[in-house]
Amino acid sequence: MKRIATTMVAVAVGATALAATAPAYADGGEPAPAKTARHGHPSAPRILSFEVTPNPVVVKGFGSASVTAKVTALGAKSVAFELSGPKGARRGDGRPGKRLAPFHSHGPVTFSTSWTFTWRDAGTWRVSVVVTGADGKRQTAVRYLTVKRDRVVPKPPVAPKPTRIVGFDAAPEPVRAGRPITLRGKLQVARCYGGWYYRVDGNVAVLGRTCPHDRPAWYGWYRLGGQKIDVYFRAKGSRHWKHVDTVKTRADGSFSAKVRALRSGTWTVKFDGTRFLKGSSASDYVPVYR
């Protein structure tokens, strides 16, 4: 799928060919047999059906929606789809149509392409297709697509905010028994969650604007400093965790702890969370040899 720009975009694509054994005809009836030249080649391309679905398409909130254009034709050498927006047309990132079926194919062939629309694309779009035959002749069809926006705004998320520990590593590994190892990682907090911006600090207050519509539901991880990280160890074959140390994250969210490796096992760092922040953890297994 191609990303539709906020302004109108025209797209010409070499579409994906799909097998079609029983085409749906635009007029609901049987088509007249295509005239053929010598060697059984169609004398001119013929469009049997052209549809754009869904139509209308509804984009919810700040999300996106996909639309597919599909044409079934006889005698097609290549197909070019063009998309024109409410503000006029200009050539976009299209590429020339390419041959998707042998010229000697007597059956209908279906071509399709898709676009992604966002809430910024609301309006009426002109979708056209040009089918070119082996003899260079063309046939064109046009449909009009309505893009609507469902103005449902997501509710402000409820505390606490998500956190995560990234880049956690216990090194070196493997390690000789009795030698020190260093545990390192970084604690981060999601600034944007559920379609709303949070403040970066521990305050759960929501800022007065929404996240960009073209980003995932929650993104934008930021450093989280001044938080306690507990270090735990569980020896291989054991079911019990032992608390080893507690460290604090630095201003950039990073933390480190030096511990002594006595047995093979799993090292875990854990942030318990607060009233405004969810807890998170990360683990790493370290083999110890003697």
Image (cartoon, rainbow, N blue to C red):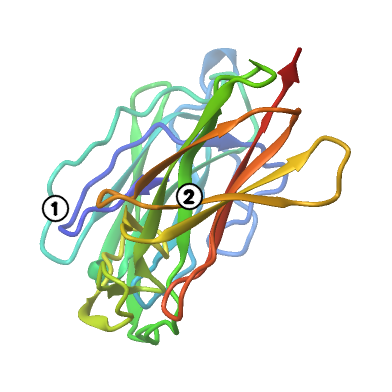
Mark 2, residues whose alpha carbon is within 10 Å: few (<14), some, or many (≥20)? many
Earlier-in-chain disc, 2 versus 1: 1
x%, y% of residue 199? Answer: 25, 73
Secondary structure at badge 2 equals strand
Disc 2 residue type?
Answer: Ile
Closer-to-camera residue (20/38): 20
Above or below — where is 184 with respect to 48? above
In the rendered structure, the answer to whether residue 155 lies left or right of residue 271 reads left
Question: Residue lying furthest right in this view?
Answer: 237
Contact (Cβ within 8 Å) of mark 2 with mark 1: no
Q: CA distance from mark 2 to mark 1?
A: 47 Å
Question: Which label number is shown at residue 76?
Answer: none
**Residue 86 location, x and y as percent?**
17, 66
Image check: 66 left or right of 4? right
Residue furthest front as drawn: 178
Residue type pointed to by label 1: Ala
Q: Note whether 251 is above or below 75 in the view shown.
A: below
Side of 198 where 75 appears, left or right: right
Q: What is the quadrant of the N terminus in the image?
A: top left
When asked about the image quadrant of residue 214, the answer is bottom left
Q: Residue at position x 37%, y 85% from top? A: 156
Q: Secondary structure at mark 1?
A: loop
**Residue position marked by numbered label 1 in the rendering:** 89
Asked which quadrant contains residue 151, the reply is bottom left
Q: Quadrant of the C terminus?
A: top right
Q: Which residue is mark 2?
A: 165
Residue 34, how many percent across, how many down? Answer: 55, 37
